[in-house]
Amino acid sequence: MTKPIQTDHASSYTSPVQADIAIVGAGAAGLMAAIAAGRAAQKNGQRLNIIAIDGANKLGAKILVAGGGRCNVTHHKVTQHEYAGGSRNAIRNVLKRFGVKDTIEFFSDLGVHLKREDTGKLFPTTNKARTVLDALLKAACDANVTLRHPDRVQSVTHSDPGLSITAESTTIQTKALILATGGMALPKSGSDGLGYSIAKALGHSITPQLFPALVPLVLDESSPLRALSGLTLPVKIELRTGSNKRLEAFTNSTLLTHFGLSGPAVMDISRHYLSARSQDPQARLIASFLPDQTRETLDKELRAIGHKKPTTWLTSKLPERLALALCAHADVSPETIGSNLTKDNRRALLDAISEHTLPVTRSRGFTHAEATAGGIPLDEIIIKSMSSNRCKNLYLCGEILDVDGRIGGFNFQWAWATGHIAGTAAAKALATMSS
């Protein structure tokens, strides 16, 4: 018979509650931390009261919407180079302690088998995010974790010898606290930045900037691309400084929308663009709609089309709507034949194709972002345990830290890795204290 999930609702709360380990936030990182703590306690023969508290009516909202409802659990190859924010060396050390192989084995033991797709992303074979969430909730139950929700945490204070959590419906006195509140992305899921204020109250700092990562971008209404909603194609997008220095580049599928741009290439470069713009207002994005061809080869082809129309030539390479829009953007008449193109015509058309300035006005904000850039600096964390070096008995994991990965399961891998390290370390620390 399946063991029921231990979920306490607000009406059953009494106050104060005593806990050995409390986890604030029961998303990906928080659930992993809870499971890891519970399992470590069982392995050590401990009887720990482990509580994960969350303000959401239904747990795991981000897990359920990830990967189009399929949950991109991780990527087949994850290195520190897939992340931005904190120290690459520190990120590498975290990933070494709990890597992709560990994630695959962890979920396999839960009965969640993963499949690798052509992109390198790993999804559950069921193609259902619910499979992942249900497995995590059951694993938490099996690890004797109590999930308390909905009960929003309001503050955390020092309470010798541990910490005191004040929530809407209860107070929890805990020996160890794991902060897994997430960042500010997708606030309807509960990630509204509360964790930052809690961390600051406990002695931590936050990076000067917090901004959306993996977020769609809005183009100026004058852009011809906004009239091409629904088109998807591979595009190379480069980030350049005002002096034209190339900072970043991503080539991947790009979706043209009624507001501007979305898709993997756009999502990946978005955080770099927003960061660069804060330092250099002239920083901009440049698109190449034929990323497999150089400007030189395109120029050679264009010179050789003779009596063929450039629109016909370009339509053989790109979706017709986009080809016509780029010709119009370059002010090249659709009736012009190749032999009649002037040098300026060719330059304008080549610019439209391979040096197309994207007139970005803003991002779509945290409401539509998949991750948060910025957070608690990694130099305030003891990486081998994810424990705070500012506050005793405090551990931090997941998106609250100043680390954000590109699209493809990298942020989930960071959540699993940091959550596992934090939960295991917290349980072991309590075992040492009681021995």
Image (cartoon, rainbow, N blue to C red):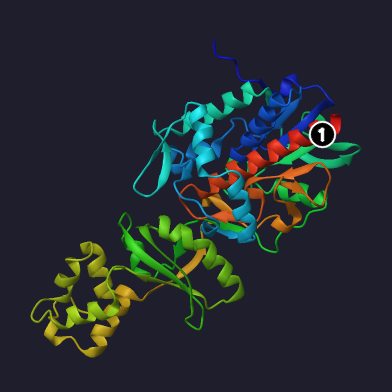
Q: Quadrant of residue 286?
A: bottom left
Give, as a three-letter code, the residue at label 1.
Thr
Say which quadrant the C terminus sits in.
top right
Would residue 149 be visible to someone looking at this image? no
How crowded pointer 1 is (Cα within 10 Å; few <14, some 14-19, many 20+) is rated as few
Residue at mark 1? 432
The image position of residue 277, as x and y in percent, is 56, 72
Q: Is residue 348 left or right of residue 129?
A: left
Residue 222 lies in quadrant: bottom left
Relative depth, front residue between 264 and 50:
50
Q: Residue furthest right?
A: 160
Q: Nearer the viewer, residue 49 or 290?
A: 49
Q: In the rendered view, would you say 318 is above or below 204?
A: below
Q: Residue at x 66, y 28 (%)?
A: 39
Q: Left or right of 150: which side holds 394?
A: right
Residue 337 in the image: x percent, y percent? 12, 81
- Look at the image and tell me in which quarter the N terminus lies: top right
Name the foreground residue: 351 vs 236. 236
Q: Residue at x 85, y 33 (%)?
A: 433
Residue 327 in percent (x, y) is at: 24, 74
Query: Quick check: can you spot residue 221?
Result: yes
Query: Which residue is outermost to the bottom?
Result: 343
Left or right for 167, reference 303: right
Residue at x 75% of width, y 55% of height: 380
